Image (tube, helix red, strand yellow):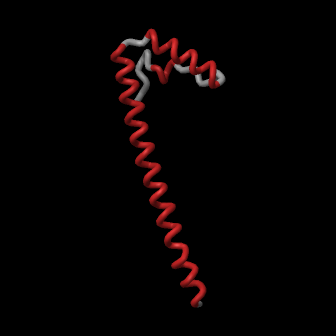
Amino acid sequence: MSAAPGNVEQEFDRTCPAGEGLIMRESELAVIGDAELVEELSMLTTQTARMRARMVDIMTELERRRCARPAQHAASARR
């Protein structure tokens, strides 16, 4: 997923403090065409879905480990 020319992600200056970056981003959005905005929204939606899926994977693994701990403690206590 490379950033296309005119892409909001590409143009956003990550060196600006948070407040300044948001103001700059809003003014940039006003001059970007509809197609580019829809493309950016689609990309962000895809990234969000991937992050949510990864969060579920991590939470599931943590829960699996948490549930496995009592069994590990019981097994080591029997030795």
Question: Is 69 on the left-hand or right-hand side of 43?
Answer: right
Q: Which residue shows up at 47% across the image and 66% down it?
A: 64
Residue reaching furthest bottom?
79
> In the displayed image of the protein, which residue is found farthest to the right?
17
x, y percent for residue 61 = 47, 61
Q: In the figure, is residue 37 to the left or right of 67? A: left
Q: Is residue 73 above or below residue 30?
A: below
Q: Quadrant of residue 75?
A: bottom right
Closer to the camera in the image, 50 or 27: 27
Name which residue lies at 36% across and 29% down.
Answer: 42
The image quadrant that residue 17 belongs to is: top right
Give percent across and percent down for residue 26: 51, 16
Measuring from the top left, give residue 4's x and y in whole percent: 41, 21
Q: Quadrant of the C terminus?
A: bottom right
The residue depicted at 40 percent of the width and 24 percent of the height is: 40
Left or right of 21, for residue 43: left
How many numbered marks are there?
0
In x, y percent, where is residue 15? 64, 23
> If the image is split into quadrants, where does the N terminus sit?
top left
Q: Is residue 6 above or below residue 69?
A: above
